[in-house]
Image (cartoon, helix red, strand yellow):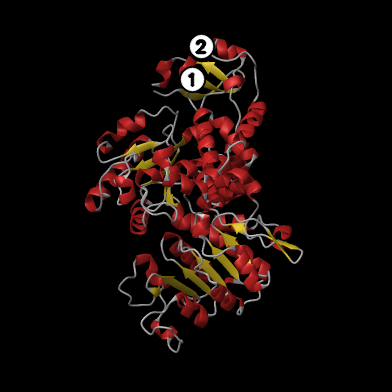
Amino acid sequence: MKTFGFKIDPLTGEDFYEIYVRGRQLLNDSHLNKGSAFTKEERLSLGLDGMLRPGLGSLETQVHRVYEAYLRKHDDLERYIYLAGLQDRSEPLFYRLLLDHLEEMVPIVYTPTVGQACMQLSHIQRRYRGIYITPENIANIDQIFQGLSQPQVSLIVVTDGERILGLGDLGSDGMGIPVGKVSLYVAAGGVHPAVCLAVTLDVGTNNQRLLDDPLYLGIRRPRMRGAEYEELVEKFILGVKRNFPGALLQWEDFAKQTAFKNLDRYRERILSFNDDIQGTGSTALAALMTGMRIKQSRFQDERYVIVGMGQAGTGIAMNIRTMLLEEGLSEEEARKRIFAVDMQGLLLEGDPLLEGPQLPLAQARACVDGWKLDDANRIGLEDVVRNAHPTVLIGVTAQPGLFSEAILAETAKHSARPIVLALSNPTHKCECSPEAVWKATDGKGLVATGSPFAPMDWHGKTLQASQCNNMYIFPGVGLGSLVCKASRVTDGMFLAASKAISTFVTPAQEALGLLLPEMNDIRQVSAAVATAVGIEARNAGLGRLLNDTQMAEAMTRAQWAPKYASYRPGSPLKGD
């Protein structure tokens, strides 16, 4: 049963929630619970009289109280558990606290702490969030969706838990990722929490640690594969289309082959995108755009080595390729500037391991003739760096220390200000630290990392690495796609988003070496990204026909701010 509905008083124009539950059930609803902030009138009309202490509080005093409790937690995992509990008690209070302390708490509710939480999710589970779709209940998907208590669903983040961050197959314990992504959609993008849904497709796991763990709460069977798996995904998508025809779906942390297949299969059938491919690629592109501005360089003037050609690496490479083509290079000229390295070494034409998206990135074998190699049968990272002379080094491998002192020193030989993006999460999986880059480049290297690192004093000058967090991209893309009523999400929308992000970096921030905006500006960044996405959708004939000013106003107006709404009692029958 629906627990409330969004309403507007036709006489006064006042926005309010019509409430369909009473008493203790209302207090236990995370969307609706206001605790001490329920007014006297609401307490009487909604069956709360006597259930609350008589003192009336405000959202501000509640934030002060819960932050005080947060500071008493002794480690990051305990802070994660506390914030999850707060979110289960009152979403407006949780999001107000999160926005008031965004830079401090994003690493707790998302990377890197969310990775630690997912590794232990069955052990720290308190209350369930989101829904779990399994082979056993997929036939009941309509009943599952119709049984949701929220008034509508406009945004879905779904995972199957097979490739969680750099941690691999975590089965249904991967639910921490879509839950965390929903939190960022709300905090950064301003999407209303009551229209967001986290989903895990629990199709088993090949992680023996989980299968042997008596506390594991997921399905205990090897991971479903092949036609059986694809049929479950198809039934899930059809269920989404039937029940939430206007919703946006974000694919999250699927394995590489599955991710590309799902994206290609469904991007034209349902409003959807893959954040690991498109979001990571666009965030990295925004960082590179800023780097080019700082260096007063063009994309075609640089040489790129990208290590790790999974979803993120392929997405980044394709975005760089797009920029090279936009600058006027031919496809062959663009190919010669991008050196893609995976498990087998440098990708070369004719390699039987190459997959569809990697084909345009493979180097012609003639291009490596005359290279000095450590092993004639394989061109490794060290060979590529020594022979290709990169000026941009990008890692998405989850191999800590991959960018060694020697590799960084060699890269520094070929550019006064090399750009290094060490993007693997969590922190202990990072390819190198910002400090290692600055030591190799005498403080001149431009750095972005997947997880946050503290600023560093370098001979009296403060140096700072940006966190190349997809949070700069996906909340704005989601908000923009929904508000402009886009029929699909295109690569052009992501390119427009990258440009919007880069323009937010100020000269003062560039002087610190920052390649992306400050986290505290994330709401404004998301609004700008949403506007750029809406304009691109309109120009492509895929979205609403608003002029630029109207589009910007629509995006800003759509951003939900954490506050307590006014409540009025309604009939439970209206929520069925």
Q: Quadrant of residue 60?
A: top right
Left or right: 456 as drawn, with respect to 17: right
Q: CA distance from mark 2 to mark 1?
A: 9 Å
Left or right: 211 as drawn, with respect to 49: left
- The residue at 41%/42% (across/down) is 175
Quadrant containing the C terminus in the rendered view: top left
Vertical arrangement, residue 288 with respect to residue 121, above or below: below
Q: Amino acid at mark 1?
A: Leu
Find residue 211 and report its horizontal and vertical position in percent: 30, 46
**Mark nearer the N terminus (2 vs 1):** 1
Residue 20 visible within the image: no
Residue 26 numbered tag: 1
Q: Give the residue number, with chain letter if any, for mark 2.
A: 47
Q: Quadrant of residue 438?
A: bottom right
Find residue 87 and report its horizontal and vertical position in percent: 52, 33
Quadrant containing the N terminus in the rendered view: top left
Q: Amino acid at mark 2?
A: Gly
- The residue at 37%/42% (across/down) is 200
| SS for callout 2 | loop
- The residue at 38%/65% (across/down) is 357
Q: Are marks 2 and 1 in contact (CB under 8 Å)?
A: yes
Q: Quadrant of residue 157?
A: top left
